[in-house]
Amino acid sequence: MGDRWMKQINFDEAGTDYGEHTAVVAAVIIDADKQFRIVEQDINDAIGAHIPEDLQDGFIFHAKDVFGKWKKRYGWDIPKCNSIIDAWIDIIRRNNLPVSLSWFPKSFHLVKSLGLQPNPEASKSFGNDSAHFLAFALNFQQCDDFMAEFYPDEVASALVEDCGHMKRYIRDMVDNLKSGEIARVLPGLIRGEITHIKNAVQFCSKKDAILIQLADVAAFSFKRYAHKNPGGERLNNLLMGIPQEIKLVEQLPLAGSRLLWRKP
């Protein structure tokens, strides 16, 4: 099952703040042989077109910084910030890169209801970390399902933005997904074993794995939508390729995943 190593899956998370109610994880899938150089050049072109010259050398894109420290440092207005974010989303859309989004609520009581036993003295941290753990599990499951359905004779490797103390949990999560253990413990959430994502997860910085930047902008855009932050609906519409003037009326489920991709 899978005799060609073709796909690379780049993961990033958003919503790590304890005060936010939902953990969001995004993954961008790329055919490394056919698309890597093209997409890498697209990112470099976007930097040249949208980022001040004195910031371009060694520039690493972080979507939250566009509306944060860079906006303050350079006095950017909102249209300027939007144009930068839009340029990175356009790279995803122009190259028709599959985007996998997943989300899970940071609720102590909901997590406990799944049969997990939190430490009462650290319930806040537990709810945050466990939500990210489960959002990652949902996303890995969806990416593996995508591979199995559309590219059954190929396998993929996974690159994840270096996420500090969560690395050990994510490594264990992937092992348990491959063995089917998580599906046995949480059958209503995870459907089965993953079979097309091979080898251990590689944890990288955006400097060392440039395409994680695209997962960053996808996670940022969907998180703003999920949290009803200003501009979130516009970003989510743009990410999904829906014209900006069409208003979404969808009610997001409490937890779940969705795949954004137009089959060629």
Image: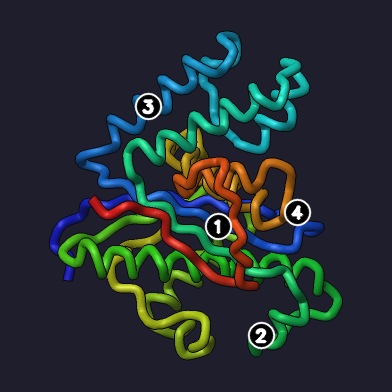
Mark found first going from the N terminus, 2 or 4: 4
Mark found first going from the N terminus, 3 or 1: 1
Question: Across the whole image, how many numbered discs are drawn on residues?
Answer: 4
Which amino acid lies under the numbered mark 3 shown in the image of this protein?
Asp
Q: Which label sits on residue 17?
A: 4
CA separation in Å, label 1 and label 2 = 21 Å
Residue 251 in sight here:
yes
CA separation in Å, label 3 and label 4 = 31 Å
Which amino acid lies under the numbered mark 1 shown in the image of this protein?
Val
Residue 180 sits above or below residue 255 on the image: below
Residue at image point 52% right, 21% down = 58
Q: Which of 259 and 214 is in front in this view?
A: 259
Q: Which of 240 and 188 is in front in this view?
A: 240
CA separation in Å, label 3 and label 1 = 23 Å
> What residue does disc 3 label?
42
Which amino acid lies under the numbered mark 4 shown in the image of this protein?
Asp
Q: Crowding near pointer 4: few (<14 within 10 Å), some, many (20+)?
A: few
Q: Position of residue 111 (x, y in %)?
A: 69, 80
Mark found first going from the N terminus, 3 or 4: 4
Q: In this view, does 145 lie to the left or right of 114?
A: left
Residue at image point 58% right, 53% down = 13
Q: Is residue 193 left or right of residue 245?
A: left
Residue 218 sits above or below residue 184 on the image: above
Q: Which label sits on residue 25?
A: 1
- Badge nearest the viewer, 1 or 2: 1
Q: In this view, does 35 lie to the left or right of 84?
A: left
